[in-house]
Amino acid sequence: MSAPPQIIELVTRFDNYYERYKSLSYNETQVRREFIDPFFKALGWDVDNTQAFDDRYKEVIHEDAIKVSGKTKAPDYSFRIGGVRKFFVEAKKPAVNLKENPEPAYQLRRYAWSAKLPLSILTDFEEFTVFDCTKKPSPSDKSSMGRIEYYTYRDYIEKWDEIESKYSKRSILTGKFDDLADSLVNRKGGRGTAGIDDAFLTEIEEWRDILAKNIALRNNELSVRELNLAVQKIIDRIIFLRICEDRGIEEYGQLKKKAEGKEIYENLKDLFIYADEKYNSGLFHFRKEDWMEEPDILTLSLKIDDQTAGGHPTLKDGVCFGPPARLLGDR
């Protein structure tokens, strides 16, 4: 496949006005609208959601929200199929030297590693860099760490077949992109993604400890067994509902909404009761049923602070933690 006319036009225009586009005054928003958006449209992606899909199923999410080290971050683009993230694209203005500057590469790899995306892309249109994101990033990493492909805008016309075969929407649907991503994971014997799972489980263990201390402080009549049971059930429920959000079973962001304002656990209990009615499972069991064990009265009676003492994570942090698919390894 030869490069489409719109790519030839973009390359020609960028070359003709190269000095202008490389100036400090030409910003990231401009390059996204004038070059990066059209570039990915040429790769078959519905960047503007012209199909009018529901938010859960848009192919491209602008300023997507993810959790990185407990804080919400926003990759410039999230490319998805059926609501499932496949890769991020982080954009910079052309004045930034992507090949030599380690900061943009670290930023992108940190986003992708947190979301368990094996591959993601860094671009300012002048440069198009693809990174293996299966290794935990470090601020001390060189700009070349994890870089597996590098193109400049002068390569786009000649190497369009190569780019299109890996990063177009069609490449996702035909499995070629996933084959490339899987090859990176398999090459490491799974160690790259295991690191993400281990980190997530460590985060959960830390949260379990903090939650247990706060529940014990505010509910001193509990036995050790009751305390452990309550902590496990609350965390399991949050993870379950967050997974449902991630997979489009529940409204995306409903947990986050419950975490806004005060009395977060009271808000959460309303969601738990709703889940009991919807799923009728042992995980949410607050109603008396003849054929089931006794309903859970304990966790509905607990008092839990919105924010724990000593600068520890808040209950809001626990409700809004990062993509649950990390726990399942299904990205």
Image: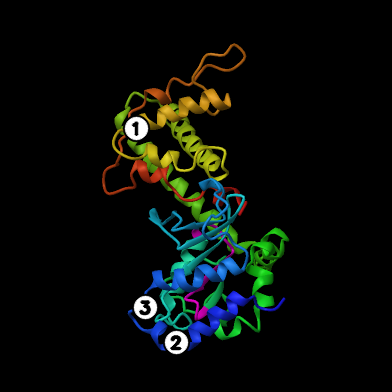
Q: Which residue is mark 3?
A: 26
Residue 137 visible, this angle: no
User: Image point 43% across, 58% down: which residue?
Assistant: 63
For the N terminus, the image quarter is bottom right
Q: Which residues are magenta?
A: 114-127
Residue 160's label in the rendered image is none
x and y percentages locating residue 6 in the rendered image:
58, 75
x and y percentages locating residue 155 in the rendered image:
60, 84
Q: Nearer the viewer, residue 69 or 127?
A: 127
User: Image point 26% across, 47% down: which residue?
Assistant: 310
x and y percentages locating residue 308 in the rendered image:
29, 41
Marks 2 and 1, the one that precedes in the sequence? 2
Residue 18's label in the rendered image is 2
Q: Residue furthest left?
A: 310
Marks 2 and 3, the one that precedes in the sequence? 2
Q: Secondary structure at mark 1?
A: helix
What residue type is disc 2 on? Tyr
Contact between marks 1 and 3 (CB within 8 A): the answer is no
